[in-house]
Amino acid sequence: MHYHGSRVSMASTYTIDLYGTDREMLPLVAEMAFNEVDRIDGLMSIYKRGSSVSFINRQAAKKPVVVGPELFEFLQRCLSFSHESEGAFDITILPLMRVWGFLDDEGRVPSVNELQKVLSRVGYQKLTLNSKQRTIEFEQDGMSLDLGGIAKGYAVDRVVSLLKEYQIERALVSAGGSTLFALGTPPREKAWRVKIRDPVSPRDPNKSALTVRLKNQSLSVAGSYEQSFTIEGVTYSHIMNPRTGRPIDGLLSVAVVTESGLEGDVLDNILFVKGLKESKSYLMRYPTVEAYFFLPVLKSDWRMVNLSSASK
């Protein structure tokens, strides 16, 4: 039996395709899966005032804030990725997103002085996690967390864990197409076939850049097309270099095939910031990861570079 369900959460449309023998159980499992996504959104959203992350953003510069075990462990993993990537991945990026106008969809280019001021409030080194007290504290006023770049991957992983608990062996879980996990394979197939969007025409359903085959793997894609604005002929993407405070240019999208959604969401961001040249050496520590870089050619074309274990 096949069941397809969808729900809007985390500002994305989550879809689940399930295969199983129990017709009545499949929609119930899908409902529980979507509820789990909503739960994580309620934990990590920066737009919901009652979320744990929103509370941290309001209070952590004033005093240490006690964090629940699940979120605290998640924040520890985030800091680990930040250390490992030398700051290419950084969850304190929210002040940068705000000053560039990405939070209210009114893009603007900040002045040099504005950028310098905001950068003083950005940096994972300014976060203090106390594992004994399970607290988080900001070193500077005006600091804020933004988990949007990784929460979707975590939610996908949580859904996959839930499906396994209910002995679902074949499923495709997608968070708006930018993060997905392929569990097992479809009936009578050796893998799930997933299309990666054309980086120049991402909303054209008739165009795709590549089809990848996945089995018990995740695909995560970071694209400059997801959110951007153009001023005086220059396009600015929402994907920021936390170290310079400026959007990344010269790259259209990065897609990675990994073992988990969380790892994929982190890596596509890190590789986007590091760029093709630096990523070649960085990926040596991830021998099973497949990465695809889509680079611009003139104004309306692109070329792809594949970095895999075979090419490293």
Image (tube, rainbow, N blue to C red):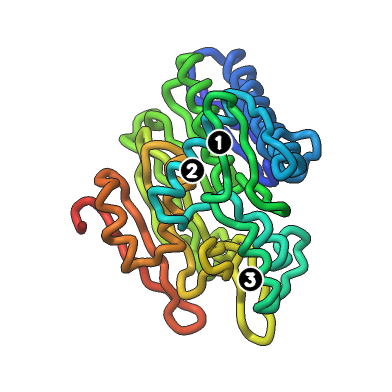
Residue 98: where, in percent of width, then height? Answer: 72, 61
Q: Is residue 232 left or right of residue 246?
A: right
Please report the residue visible at 75 percent of the width from the left and 37 percent of the height from the top. 55
Does the CB distance between marks 2 and 3 fall below 8 Å? no
149 shown above or below 129: below
Q: Secondary structure at mark 3?
A: helix
Residue at horizontal 37%, vertical 37%?
259
Residue 189: percent from left, percent from top = 34, 34
Q: Label 1 belongs to which residue?
A: 129
Q: Relative to residue 308, is residue 275 depicted above or below?
A: below
Tell me the kind of residue under disc 3: Gln
Question: In whole angstroms, how far apart are the C-alphas of marks 1 and 2?
Answer: 9 Å
**278 to the left or right of 51:** left
Q: Of callouts 1 and 2, which one flags the residue occurring earlier in the amino acid sequence?
A: 2
Which mark is nearer the camera, 1 or 2? 1
Q: Nearer the viewer, residue 263 or 176?
A: 263
**Numbered label attached to residue 112:** none
Of the 4 image quadrants, the one containing the C terminus is bottom left
Tell me which amino acid carries mark 1. Answer: Leu
Q: Which label sits on residue 79? A: 2
Foreground residue, 195 or 146? 146
- Residue under label 3, please give it: 116
Q: Can residue 8 be seen from the camera position used here?
A: no
The percent position of residue 40, horizontal first and vertical second, equals 64, 31
Dot 3 alpha-carbon crowd within 10 angstroms: few under 14, some 14 to 19, many 20 or more: few
In this view, the residue in front, 45 or 112, is 112
